[in-house]
């Protein structure tokens, strides 16, 4: 690989700058953090938020389409 030494130094500098203590929790650690019913509750709450917004958007598109057809524009 071209510039292998420079790449290695840059990656080492980034690791030192970022700090080894900070790391992202992976999926196996998240399973221990959330409780049994939390995933279902998050899905239901997301659907409660997303479905009304999507319905309003689709209704607006339908009304715009109806206006074009009915008015003959």
Image (cartoon, grey):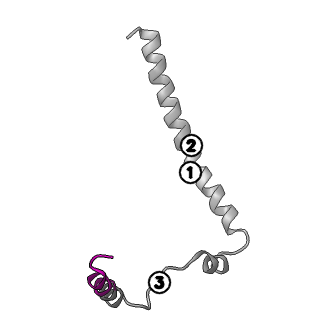
Q: In the image, is 35 to the left or to the right of 14?
A: right
The quadrant of the picture occupied by the C terminus is top left
Chain part drawn in magenta: 1-11
Residue at image location 69% in from the left, 62% down from the top: 40
Q: In the image, is 52 to the left or to the right of 20?
A: right
Q: Pointer 1: residues within 10 angstroms few (<14), some, or many (20+)?
A: few
In the displayed orientation, state which residue is furthest to the front: 1
Compared with residue 31, is residue 18 higher up or lower down, i.e. above or below?
Answer: below
- First reached walking from the N terminus: tag 1 or tag 3: 3
Query: Could you tell me if the residues under marks 1 and 3 are in contact, i.e. CB atoms within 8 Å?
Result: no
Query: Could you tell me if the residues under marks 3 and 2 are in contact, i.e. CB atoms within 8 Å?
Result: no
Q: In the image, is 22 to the left or to the right of 11?
A: right
Q: Nearer the viewer, residue 65 or 6?
A: 6
Residue at image location 33% in from the left, 83% down from the top: 11
Question: Distance of mark 2 from mark 1, alpha carbons?
Answer: 6 Å
Q: Position of residue 33 (x, y in %)?
A: 63, 79
Query: Could you tell me if the residues under marks 2 and 1 are in contact, i.e. CB atoms within 8 Å?
Result: yes
Q: In the rendered structure, does residue 34 fall within the stretch colored magenta?
A: no
Question: Distance of mark 1 from mark 3, alpha carbons?
Answer: 31 Å
Tell me the tag on residue 49: 1
Disc 2 on helix, strand or loop?
helix
Tell me the tag on residue 52: 2
Q: Nearer the viewer, residue 27 or 64?
A: 27
Q: Which residue is mark 3?
A: 23
């Amino acid at each position: 690989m071209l510039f292998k030494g420079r790449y290695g130094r840059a990656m080492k500098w980034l690791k030192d700058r970022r700090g080894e203590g900070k790391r992202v929790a992976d999926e196996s650690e998240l399973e221990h953090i959330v409780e049994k019913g939390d995933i279902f509750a998050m899905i239901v709450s997301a659907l409660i938020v997303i479905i009304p917004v999507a319905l309003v958007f689709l209704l607006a598109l339908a009304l715009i389409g109806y206006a074009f057809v009915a008015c003959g524009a």
